[in-house]
Image (tube, rainbow, N blue to C red):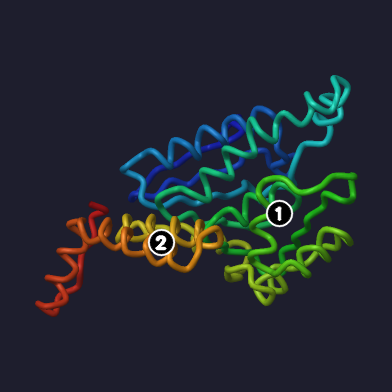
Amino acid sequence: MGDSPVVVDRADAVATITLNDPEHRNALTAASKVALRDAVADAADDERVRAVVLAGSAKAFCLGQDLAEHAKALEGGPERAFATVREHYTPIVRDLLTMPKPVIAAVGGTCAGAGLGLALACDHRVFATGVKLATAFAGIGLTFDTGLSVTLPRAVGEARAKELMLFGRTFTAEEAITWGISGETVPADEVLPRSVALARQLAAGPTTAFAESKRLIGQARGLSLDEALEAEALGQVTCGSTSDHAGAVAAFLNREVPVFTGQ
């Protein structure tokens, strides 16, 4: 994959964004965070891309923050060291969560700390069988970042999220799915092919409907019932204005398979 800390491949309306530092299990350096931030933003804005895969090279997904680099940054004080949260982690996670197209995390190996945050910011996960996950923050005296204070309790409940943070134990993908983290497990060598296959399936779907559904789910907890119902009504008008909707209705009436163009 070369020396770039993040590699992007575009094919069949799918952008595959791969963290590319296998020697360090894809730990996040300043360079990789900038590259990932830019790659995610580009994929979100690219109308040719209708689904995204976020992956890690070799046998890791992402170990989290590169602690060697972090230790050097701490020499300049905590404000300097943790500026990365606002400058890098926040925009990456915001773009993943709000991206108007589906995102699949291909979790083929180690997934801890900020790596877990990245995985949970995606819409669906394909895990390697038995892969280990961890919050890892308390072990180095830190709290959540990368959106985990939101995504983890939403997925597993507040009580479980507190347990995983306080005790910091590792857990398996199979446990994660049982607790409510959406995903599936496959043998390690099938993680990326399965993730890309799912992304291609989604890329051939009604892109605007997916975008509106993500938006409605993301904002629902902050709305009253009446506000949520009104948001749904507006969302349906948005989707109903697309050629994908008109074409799908016509296809149904003609007993044909609809073809979605993302328009």
**Viewer-nearest residue: 8 or 259:** 259
Q: Does the rendering let one see residue 204?
A: no
Q: Mark 1: which secondary structure? A: helix
Q: Please rate how many residues cluster around mark 1, counting C-alpha atoms within 10 Å: few if below 14, some from 14 to 19, many from 20.
A: some
Q: Residue at x 63, y 49 (%)?
A: 118
Determine the image quadrant of residue 2: top right
Query: In this picture, is 78 found above or below 65?
Result: above
Direction from residue 186 to residue 168 in the image, left or right: right
Query: In this picture, is 61 found above or below 174?
Result: above
Mark 2 or mark 1: whose residue is earlier in sequence: 1
- Looking at the rendered structure, which numbered label has been put on residue 131? none
| Percent position of residue 89, x then y | 64, 39
- Looking at the rendered structure, which numbered label has been put on residue 213? 2
- Looking at the rendered structure, which numbered label has been put on residue 149? 1
| Percent position of residue 69, x then y | 80, 29
**Viewer-nearest residue: 90 or 122:** 90
Q: Residue at x 37, y 62 (%)?
A: 230
| Kind of residue at badge 2 | Ser
| Percent position of residue 215, x then y | 44, 55
**Viewer-nearest residue: 79 or 260:** 79
